[in-house]
Amino acid sequence: MHEAQNALIFSLFLIFTGAAVCATLALYARQALPIAYIVLGIVIGPYGFKLINNAEAIEQMAQIGIMFLLFLLGLDLSPQRLLQMLRKATLITLGTSLVFAMIGAGVAKLFGYTPGECLLIGAAMTFSSTIIGLKLLPTRTLHHQHTGEIIISILLLQDMLAIATLLLIEGLGGRGSSLQGLGLLIVTLPMLLGFAFLISRYILIPLIRKFDKIREYIFLVAIGWCLCISQIAALLGLSYAIGAFIGGVALATSPIALYIAESLKPLRDFFLVLFFFSLGAGFDLGMLSTVFLPTLTLGLLLLGAKPWVFRGFLQWAGERPRIAMEVGVRLGQVSEFSLLIAVLAQQNALISGEASYLVQATTILTFIASTYYLVLTYPTPVAISDSLRRD
């Protein structure tokens, strides 16, 4: 027990001290901080210098970062505004997802993967990163404007499609019926929404109003509610992240939702450092030569196609070309959900280890390249140009 505790403390020491050093170098070079954390994971992780041999515990903690990110996102969206956004984005999300799936499946077929692997690789390529998309939004400008709303609505719908894909993989892998899993999603999601709004309206918001001057209490209630609704979502067959988002939306009508969001941001950032580190730590450089050519081909095709495909669909929906292109660039990478799909599909023997690693390597490649181009071109908190750098 004592040795395990020491190992965890030493791991956190290496991660956050190393992250501080890498972040300093990245800021001098005007690079996005997530890239620095990924590089750190590659260097000191199990496939680098092996200073941290077992990143499993770190990876589990890293998922909390995603939960807090979506919880804070939900706090900024009223239910009426959310429904309006989702209605508009449905056709755009479905259309673009189909195009990206065809690109992924086509490249996989070109390099000789089986039909089943082609389908799953294509499915994994359909999503964009919620973390990159939201983390690099200038929160005091775009986040409250039209461009940010488009990005948020597309990402939310993509996350729902990703959950449905994970349920389907579970069913195909013999752990249950995929149709039952999808049916469960349709039933449990409205139940969770109703439960969250009832508890929020009749219990949480009255308590917050009564004790709103005790900041420590508000902080504890917010964290407890986020983790509680996330756990309920997981028990119902949904994801922790979707549960956290629903919990945030349910509290969005609270008079101090903005204060809750601001107070939880440092906690969110703590766990997001762990997320990006674990992403790099899971990158096996020894496997890179095996999938180098398909990874490079697929990654470059997606990086080139995603901005223009999003632009085309958004212009068709009536958006201005400048806004449509910016949304496309901000959503021009593959998603962290793609990593989950690849790992789960391999665990269920639906794809080979090589196919799984193709998805993982392509995800990291697009993470790095898309982020680099984004900070060169558009407003972000760490943009290359001072004129583009906004909080």
Image (cartoon, rainbow, N blue to C red):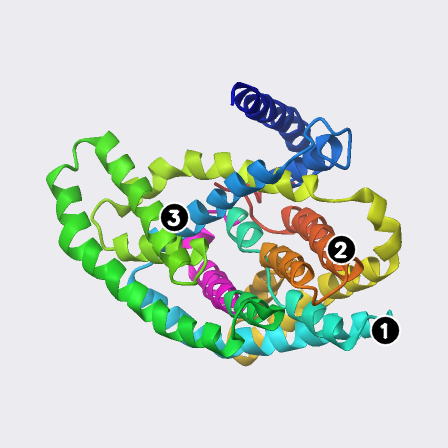
Magenta stretch: residue 16 in it?
A: no
- What amino acid is found at the position of numbered circle 2 in the picture? Tyr
Say whether disc 2 or disc 3 marks the residue closer to the N-terminus: 3
x and y, in percent, of residue 211 in the image: 14, 37
Q: Residue at x 32, y 54 (%)?
A: 247
- The residue indicated by pointer 3 is 72
Q: Main secondary structure of the magenta part?
A: helix
Segment colored magenta: 137-161
Which dot, 2 or 3, sits closer to the camera? 2
Classify 10 Å Cα crowding around label 1: few (below 14), some (14-19), many (20 and above). Answer: few
Which dot, 3 or 1, sits closer to the camera? 1
- The residue indicated by pointer 1 is 110
Q: Residue at x 43, y 53 (%)?
A: 240
x and y, in percent, of residue 229 in the image: 33, 53
Describe the element under mark 3 as helix, strand or loop.
Answer: helix
**Tally of numbered tags:** 3
- The residue indicated by pointer 2 is 357
Q: CA distance from mark 2 to mark 3?
A: 32 Å
Which sits in the foreground, 58 or 143? 58
Q: CA distance from mark 1 to mark 2?
A: 17 Å
- What amino acid is found at the position of numbered circle 3 in the picture? Leu
Quadrant of residue 348 within the rendered picture: bottom right
x and y, in percent, of residue 10 in the image: 59, 21
Discs 1, 2 touching: Cβ within 8 Å: no
